[in-house]
Amino acid sequence: MKSNSIIILILIPFFGISKTWLVGPTKTYQSPSAVSSLVADGDSILIDAAEYEKDVCLWKAHNLTFIGVGGFAHLNAEGTAYGGKAIWVITGNFNRLENIEFSNCTVVDRNGAGIRLEGTSLTVNHCYFHNNQDGILAGDNPASDIVIEYSEFSHNGAGDGYSHNLYINHVRSLTFKFNYVHHAYYGHELKSRAYKNIILYNRITNEDGDASYEIDLPNGGPALIMGNSIQQSRYSDNNTFISYGREGLTNPGNHTLYFIYNTLVNNEDKGIILNIQTGMDTLVCANNLIAGKVTLLNGIPKGFINLNNFIQSDLSVFEFRDALNYDYHLSKGSPGKDSAYVFNESFLAYELNPTHEYIHPVESKFRYSDLHPDLGAYELQQVSANKEYPKHRMQAFYLSDSKQLILDNKGSDLTNKQINCTVFSLDGKPFSPKRQTGVLNTFDLAELIPGIYTFTLKVNSEQYAGTFVVTR
């Protein structure tokens, strides 16, 4: 998996002096478990790319940063687990992972996970979870925000239908973007009881596997599912694509689901796209491309907006680029071009028109935008070469201690450039921070209260976007 053009580094304040721990076969500390009891709040753990067999441990410290160096640091549990739970049990708060691979965790209870999250909040970037009984298993924590981006989840599940590629319990929010999720073993590709769910620009494809639901949001709550490529196998264990509230509408807040700009392909001989709990507040289903023999809706919402969806049982009608290999980009002969309804509103801090596309494997790009967008997860008209944004040209860093958003301009001169920054809270409220007086690349965010935020930056004609967390 290659790095993406936008890197958001979340820096959380801590007390004391942080330390960097070097881990690897040729280092003083030859495995992550060798430092797990030594690290202090705010430390960084750099782990060399290598395979660490049966190395399982507990992480208690807060504000840790884990990075695999030179490739994936592969934690191959080989059937073991810490405390009968997971490869890594994380009880600390506000930790961040990048370039770590978790595999082959099994336990007697059939829920051995790559990560068992028992602390508050976690950010996962560019990680790989496979052949565990659960990829990530997160416990109940109403103060916890989980962000997972640019990661792959495959072949997780114990085969009992109760374990999944990901299983997120009752947390404050889940933000799930630019991921590749596939081949759950008789479980769901993604199951989340989070109070708020933001699921954007992912490839969620069971391919030739035997998974159950593609997305299960069993307790409802505000949810945005936009810009995803979703496919169900002919061998699927259950013909529902998206399940919402079917275990009870018990989450706090309004039970509203926006299901927009997705491309769905059903390779079974029947299927249900949206299997909802009758009585949910509002369902908006718009601008989707849906291929295969399906029923759009099972259940009766209080409010239902069904707008500009193209549904056809014959897959050949869509003329996808390479449907046999699950590439559902449009071609010149595809239906749905220039026919999407353009929303002039936002939900959960996101505009209701897609800004990105998933690129396989585990990449993203800006989506071409005009006044006439296409249906589904992909735009036929692509960003021209002179508008492509060079990788790593600019990075954005949020500094919690000073409550500032910093642009790393990579040597570019910002002196005469117009820079506009807009920050959105999860409830969609915008905030326009001011540039710090006398400083070209710094925005003041002192007014923000703790929570998870998104931002957009426009530097002349170029655009950047990202996510950050404000802590106390």
Image: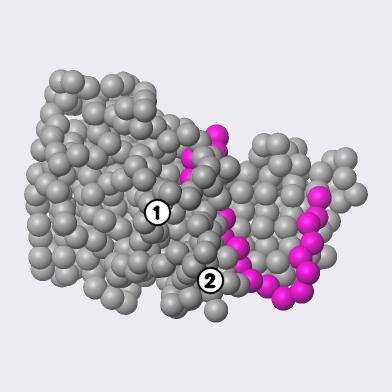
Q: Mark 1 points at which residue?
A: 419
Q: In which quarter of the image is the N terminus?
A: top right
Q: Is residue 27 left or right of residue 40?
A: right
Front in this rendered view, residue 271 or 225 = 225
Q: Categorize mark 1 by other alpha carbons within 10 Å: few (<14), some (14-19), many (20+).
A: some
Q: Which residue is drawn at 22% across and 65% down?
A: 256
Say if residue 148 shows up in the picture: yes
Query: How far across and down, in percent of the image, does residue 282 sit?
Result: 16, 65
Q: Does the magenta stretch include residue 5?
A: yes
Q: Which residue is drawn at 52% across and 45% down?
A: 413
Say if residue 157 shows up in the picture: no
| 450 w.r.t. 307: above or below | below
Front in this rendered view, residue 465 or 241 = 465
Q: Does the magenta stretch include residue 9?
A: yes
Q: Is residue 149 left or right of residue 227?
A: right
Q: Which residue is drawn at 42% across and 44% down?
A: 178
Q: Name the residue under label 2.
A: 403
* Three-letter amino acid code of the residue under disc 1: Ile
Q: Give the range drawn in magenta.
A: 1-22
